[in-house]
Image: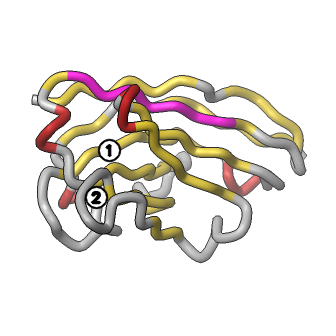
Amino acid sequence: QVQLVESGGGLVQAGGSLRLSCAASGRTFSIYRMGWFRQAPGKAREFVTTIRWSGDTGGTTYYADSVKGRFTISRDNAKNTVYLQMKSLKPEDTAVYYCAASSAARYLADSRNYDYWGQGTQVTVSS
């Protein structure tokens, strides 16, 4: 089992920045990929970004088009932590943000392919 704990959410004005953190514990050696998803009220959970956790392609990142150029995912393997730096935030970025971990190489943007989830952290962007 892998446990994930997010932190860093909050209220920010449009154009502002926030950094989310996700600390992993437990069987972290089994992690293949970590990512962030978000879910706005009344909407389905959507892919935000992901990072390959280890191996020859460790550090490889992918982003949803809606956040490309504004959000940056990074990792600190020594701390078993993944970060999401969010800049130029927009009201439409308002959502609960979830950290997720996958133990295998599967389609990275499908939430069903992630085995472990954090509890979520609220990000609210005011206009």
- In the picture, the quarter occupied by the N terminus is top left
Q: Position of residue 124 (x, y in %)?
A: 71, 37
Q: Position of residue 88 (x, y in %)?
A: 83, 55
Instruction: State which region is magenta.
Output: 19-25
User: Going 50% across and 52% down the picture, which residue do you hit?
Assistant: 42
Q: Which residue is mark 2?
A: 111
Please count the marks in the image: 2
User: Going 48% across and 60% down the picture, which residue do you hit?
Assistant: 49
Dot 2 amino acid type: Ser
User: Going 53% across and 71% down the picture, which residue do you hit?
Assistant: 64
Mark 2 neighbour density, 10 Å: few (under 14) some (14–19) many (20 or more): some
Q: Quadrant of residue 13?
A: top right
- On residue 100, which mark appears? 1
Label the magenta part by its dominant secondary structure. strand
Q: Nearer the viewer, residue 58 or 110?
A: 58
- On residue 57, which mark appears? none
Label 1 or label 2, whichever comes before in sequence order: 1
**Magenta stretch: residue 87 in it?**
no
Q: Position of residue 12 (x, y in %)?
A: 82, 34
User: Going 18% across and 60% down the picture, which residue do you hit?
Assistant: 113
Q: Are marks 1 and 2 in contact (CB under 8 Å)?
A: yes
